[in-house]
Amino acid sequence: MILRDYQQRAVDETRKVILLGRKKVLVVSPTGSGKSICIAEIFRLANLREKKCLFLVHRRNLVLQIKETLESFGLVVGVIMAGVETNLGALVQVSTIQTFSRRLNLDELDQNNFFFPADIVVCDEAHRCCSKQYVDVLSLYSGKVIIGFTGTPARSDGKGLGEVFDEIVDVISVKELTEKGFLAPVKYYSSPSEIDLSDVKIQCGDYQAGQLGDKMSSKKLVGDVVQNWLKYGEGRKTIVFAVNVKHSHFLLEEFLANGIPAARLDAKSPDEERQEVFQQMESGKVLVLINVLLYVEGMDCPEISCVSFARPTKSLVLYRQGGGRGMRPKKDGGNLIFLDHGNIIHGQNGQDGHGLLDDEITWSLDGKELAWKKPKKEKKEKKPVTCTACRLIFQGSICPDCGTEVKSYGKDVETIDADLEEIDPKKKKMTMADKRRWFGMCKHYQKQKGYQDGWAANKYRSKTGVWPRGMDDVAPIVPDVEFMNRIKYEQIKYAKQRQRQKELEAQK
């Protein structure tokens, strides 16, 4: 198999560092960059010298997936996992960290058949390597080569991984992978309002899940998740990140109540249920998968083209790992839609956000400070601003889309039930052909529903901002998914406005 240039560079740089005597190497490469290919090449080269290699992963479903990749490089691979026949004579072994750790506790090492005397130990998702389970296992390989692979080299509290590794090989950035077409570009929509999290405790470097779940499940949730998915999600296969189990059930009920085929999974969901839901998603029977940290890592589903964070997070690791689930290139060359319901990008309560998924980052092994630093922007570089008319995010003072001059943008607009706003300076304007097509769909829907004359023109104006002058010749066109999603979104919005009005009148 021919490696991409950056994959070959990762292998070469890693070997060079090891030859210089640095045996604990952390290889940083973004989600979707093909880390398993690099690992397979390292093992292939090691096998030529009859070196024994152990690959540790953290989830069962990854073991057979990794085994298949390694075998494509001509390697003979053994698996140490319950329910799978072992081949301890193979030079390459793959196991979950849980199984390997548990079996090593059965007998003394010199009498334990499951202890594999590896020359090279590779750890997948190496940001987990500071856990006691990993530390205990890796201590058995003192003096051996230990290589960790991750796209986010930081502990859950944001600190570096220096207690395990002594050298970083930073392979390639998300921005460069996107520019080369190896990752899908991202179109962002972010909530314009802040969520008051001042009373939510911080636990293990992130918001305490119970308190945050209660906050995000309340009626004051900024940016209704379902409503904005209907408007911006375009009917795409979507993964939604919930705070906790309670919050995930709340979201599931909302999606199902609005006729959207959805499912939810969490850490306690049995393997059979996970497999069934995933198959339903691949077949299109399920469009939205709501999860509680279950598919942050190790989920390989290229068809995911919308990621919705229905939660704030202080964890850059969670944000980048979760966002990366949908960045694998699409068959149609399309983009990923990222829906931010937690002000993750811009930040909140006076704190900086995590920025965009392709922002440049310098990683560090320092275990006392944050593991990342963002390069300082040039003073002359203008900060992104939001157009007060069309909500486009751009740099400068004149909106490139609608020509509005933005004179002041320092004060947030207070809102409760907020729409998400686009963070994309390359937003395309509707062409005349697009506008005529949209008006045709409005005409078709008006006739289908028996609405009065003028409904189609008003609906066209709500979309484009102008009346359909000179379009009397436009024929009715059968509505597409985008049109129907917008209609449903507006119906939900109208129903909520009526409900709030009734509640206010009842209070009087």
Image (tube, rainbow, N blue to C red):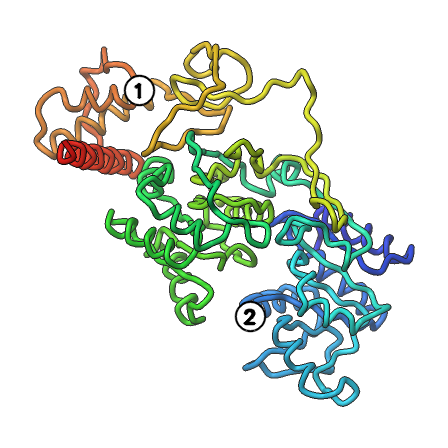
Residue 5 visible somewhere in the drawing: no
* Along the viewing direction, whichever of 411 and 489 lies nearer the viewer: 411
N-terminal of the pair, mark 2 or mark 1, is 2
Residue 310 percent coordinates (x, y): 42, 45
Quadrant of the snapshot with the N terminus: bottom right
Helix, strand or loop for disc 1:
helix
Q: Is residue 466 above or below residue 91?
A: above
Mark 2 touches mark 1? (CB < 8 Å): no
Which residue corresponds to the image point at 83% horizontal and 73% vertical from the top-left? 50
Q: How much space separates mark 2 and mark 1, taking CA atoms?
A: 50 Å
Q: Residue beneath label 2, please? A: 60
Residue 368 visible somewhere in the drawing: yes
Q: Is residue 384 above or below residue 308?
A: above
Residue 14 percent coordinates (x, y): 81, 54
Q: Residue beneath label 1, please? A: 464
- Dot 2, how many residues are within 10 Å of its Cα: few (below 14), some (14-19), or many (20+)? some
Helix, strand or loop for disc 2:
helix
Which residue corresponds to the image point at 40% horizontal and 54% vertical from the top-left? 290
Which residue corresponds to the image point at 48% horizontal and 36% vertical from the top-left? 343
492 vs 93, left or right, is left
Quadrant of the snapshot with the C terminus: top left
- What amino acid type should be assigned to the residue bearing mark 1? Thr
2 vs 470, left or right, is right
459 vs 281, left or right, is left
Residue 27 percent coordinates (x, y): 74, 52
- Dot 1, how many residues are within 10 Å of its Cα: few (below 14), some (14-19), or many (20+)? some
* Along the viewing direction, whichever of 116 and 418 lies nearer the viewer: 418
Toward the bottom, the furthest residue is: 111
Which residue corresponds to the image point at 43% horizontal and 71% vertical from the top-left? 270
Residue 250 percent coordinates (x, y): 32, 53
- What amino acid type should be assigned to the residue bearing mark 2? Arg
- How many labels were placed on the picture? 2
